[in-house]
Image: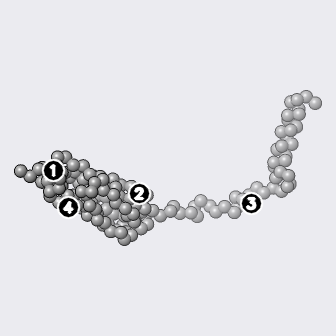
Amino acid sequence: MNSLSLICLIGIALMAWTAGGGCSGQNDSGTERDSQPEQSEYSAEKQSVISFDTLDHDFGTILEGERVLCYFDYENSGDASLIIQSVEASCGCTIVDWSRDPLAPGQGDRLQVVFDATGRSGAQIKLITVITNASNPRVELILRANVKRNV
């Protein structure tokens, strides 16, 4: 028998062995597939989505020592409850207050932000990082102000 015939014979034997289910001699084709549910039976996991009206607030020109207030309005545009887990300001001069209660889909609320310009002068840019359970879990908000010294 030449080597080509031997290779063909081995190939045919392997095909027959795998078609017969290997050593067990059982053919399990279809069993595993039948036990798997159709993909259409699964629905996508519900998630919250936090959507802000604006990501940037400019106080304009303010005086050194002033405390100014603004709000960042947001909405849960997802289909699961939204929870704000933490809010971190880049500077101790910025204080943020927010609701710790879950926000239902379609509902809105606001972050209250106070910027204290005491001891500050010139252009100020402060970052506020909002951490949530949403599909967009980290949102950066920006505060801007031009602080003038009292004369």
The quadrant of the image that shows the N terminus is top right
The span from disc 2 to disc 1 (Cα, nearest Å) is 32 Å
Q: Give the image's coloring scheme.
A: one colour
Q: CA distance from mark 4 to mark 1?
A: 14 Å
Q: CA distance from mark 3 to mark 1?
A: 73 Å
Q: Earlier in the sequence, mark 4 or mark 2?
A: 4
The residue singled out by tag 2 in the image is: 137
Q: Is residue 33 visible?
A: yes
Which residue appears at 26% of the width and 61% of the height?
A: 95
Camera-side residue: 6 or 85? 85
Answer left or right for 38 relative to 106.
right
Question: In the displayed structure, would residue 102 be above or below residue 13?
Answer: below
Q: Give residue 116's position: percent from left, percent from top.
A: 20, 58
- Could you tell me how far apart the alpha carbons at marks 3 and 4 are, in whole angstroms? 65 Å
| Residue 99 screen position, x and y as percent | 33, 68
Please give the residue where the numbered disc 1 appears in the rendered image: 147
User: What residue is shown with label 4?
Assistant: 69
Q: Is residue 62 above or below residue 97?
A: above
* N-term mark: 2 or 1: 2
Query: Disc 4 residue type?
Result: Leu
The furthest residue to the left: 151
**Crowding near the residue tagged with mark 1, few <14, some 14–19, many ≥20 C-alpha atoms within 10 Å:** many
Circle 4: element type = strand
Expressed as whole percent of the image width and height from the top left, the position of residue 88 reads 33, 57
